[in-house]
Image (cartoon, grey):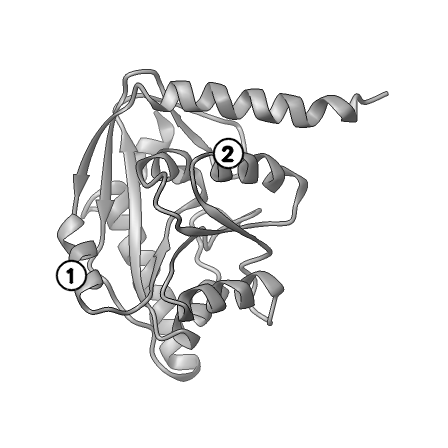
Amino acid sequence: MRLRWAEPLAAHLGAALLGLLAATWRYKVRGWEHVEAAHGRRRPIVYVLWHSRILPLLYSRRGEGMALLISRHRDGGHLTELSERWGYRVVRGSSKRGGEAGLLGLVRHLRDGAEVALTPDGPRGPAERVKPGALAAAHHADALVIAAGARASSAWWLRSWDRFCVPKPFAAVEVVYSAPFTVGEGKDGLRRGVADAERALREVTYGPEGGSGEREG
């Protein structure tokens, strides 16, 4: 018999322990000038990041009140606990295209001038393949899109669908932001946006060569 009553307590303790671990990480940020340039254009911003890198990226922008799209899947409840602890506003839903409540909620946040972060390959993959829903939401809100990546000097890689990255204690974490881009009109504009997002995410995650050797570490 599963002890369901213990799950909220376990999630709370897990969030606290992750906070202690994350406090040891040493951050270096590249591409922050792109974020500042986007702020100067006074348009809403959508940050896209691979699901595997969500943990170090979440901690790096904690306390800013950014909105985060998290799936309604049970696993998303644990991430919600952690995100709210770190100062995010959570919107529950899916990044699938087709008028999901979560994406509509994000559009409302964007039109109010909020910044939004989401994982376009979540919640269940395929890993590092952009679903178009996130970019459709950015287009509807006339938002700028910025890809965010994280690289850790040492990390544990979980045996999950995305090879989830947990930097080890005192790891050096490099956070990288891409130049902002927009999503054009119609199906062609959306296809170009998906291609632009995948290219930018490869570069900020693995470097200009776009290799994926780090995932094997």
In this rendering, would 36 be left or right of 11? left
Mark 2 Cα shell of 10 Å, populated few (<14), some (14-19), many (≥20)? many
Q: Residue at x 44, y 45 (%)?
A: 88
The residue at which mark 2 appears reads as 82
On screen, residue 35 above or below 124: below
Could you say which is closer to the camera, residue 154 or residue 142?
Answer: 142
Could you say which is closer to the camera, residue 180 or residue 88?
Answer: 88
Q: Residue at x 25, y 47 (%)?
A: 204
Which quadrant is the N terminus positioned in?
top right
Cβ–Cβ under 8 Å for marks 2 and 1:
no
Q: Position of residue 64 (x, y in %)?
A: 34, 45
Is there any visible trace of residue 193 in the rendered image?
Answer: yes
Q: Residue at x 55, y 68 (%)?
A: 104
Q: Which is more N-terminal, label 1 or label 2?
A: 1
Could you say which is closer to the camera, residue 151 or residue 215?
Answer: 151
Mark 1 Cα shell of 10 Å, populated few (<14), some (14-19), many (≥20)? few
Q: Amino acid at mark 1?
A: Ala
The residue at which mark 1 appears reads as 37
Question: Residues under labels 2 and 1: Cα distance?
Answer: 29 Å
In this rendering, would 102 be left or right of 173? right
Q: Position of residue 188 (x, y in %)?
A: 39, 80
